[in-house]
Image: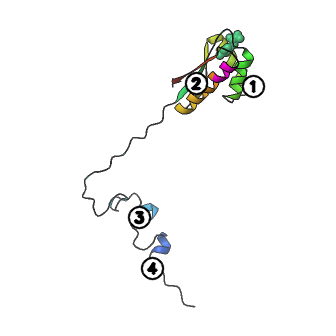
Amino acid sequence: MTPLPVPAGDILTGKAPGCREGTPSQAGDKTQMSRFENENDHGVVTEHKKQVKQPKKYKVILLNDDYTTMEFVVFILETVFHKSSQQAHALMMSIHTSDRGIAGVYSFEIAEMKVAIVTELARKHEFPLRCIMEEE
Ligand code: TYC
């Protein structure tokens, strides 16, 4: 049997012939041409590394009042904020005694949506329950 003709190098490197990237061990080698370099690169920096910023987070806060029933607050914490029955009850009691409490922390859009849902449910059930958001 005659062996198939194989271009030198490609079996060991896994690269097509003429590929400049090299093996993983050569990836950080400064003598190699970097991925952004090309024939038009005359050593002038045209690209700056962007600082990666974490997106802001927002606390969704329930406020205490004298008229909203405890059952309704527990219901809100279970259904809108996915708390267990025990967590919801403990948090509701904490809000009841301390005047406010964090129901959850979310991105801006999700926090805004939770506030809107709670506000609408409270309005529908004729409770004065207030729900606000604050940057973390
Ligand atoms: N203070 C209310 C009551 O005694 C209960 C309550 C708890 C209301 C938490 C609002 O965010 C709240 N019925």
Considering only order in the chain, which callout, 2 or 1, is on the residue closer to the N terminus? 2
The residue that label 3 is drawn on is 21
Residue 22 in the image: state x and y as whole percent: 42, 65
Q: Image quadrant of ligand 1?
A: top right
How crowded pointer 1 is (Cα within 10 Å; few <14, some 14-19, many 20+) is rated as few
Q: How far apart are marks 1 and 4 (CA)?
A: 67 Å
Considering only order in the chain, which callout, 4 or 1, is on the residue closer to the N terminus? 4
Range of magenta residues: 120-127
The residue that label 2 is drawn on is 60
Q: Distance between the residues labelled 1 and 2?
A: 19 Å
**Residue in the picture at 62% in, 21% down:** 119
How crowded pointer 3 is (Cα within 10 Å; few <14, some 14-19, many 20+) is rated as some
The residue that label 1 is drawn on is 85
Question: At numbered mark 3, what does the secondary structure look like: helix, strand or loop?
Answer: loop
**Residue in the picture at 45% in, 75% down:** 9
Q: How far apart are marks 4 and 3 (CA)?
A: 17 Å
Q: Distance between the residues labelled 2 and 4?
A: 62 Å
Question: At numbered mark 1, what does the secondary structure look like: helix, strand or loop?
Answer: helix
Residue 14 shown left or right of residue 71 in the figure: left
Residue 58 shown left or right of residue 90 in the figure: left
Residue farthest to the top, as pictured? 66
Q: How far apart are marks 1 and 3 (CA)?
A: 56 Å
Considering only order in the chain, which callout, 4 or 2, is on the residue closer to the N terminus? 4
How crowded pointer 4 is (Cα within 10 Å; few <14, some 14-19, many 20+) is rated as few
The kind of residue on which mark 4 rests is Pro
The residue that label 4 is drawn on is 7
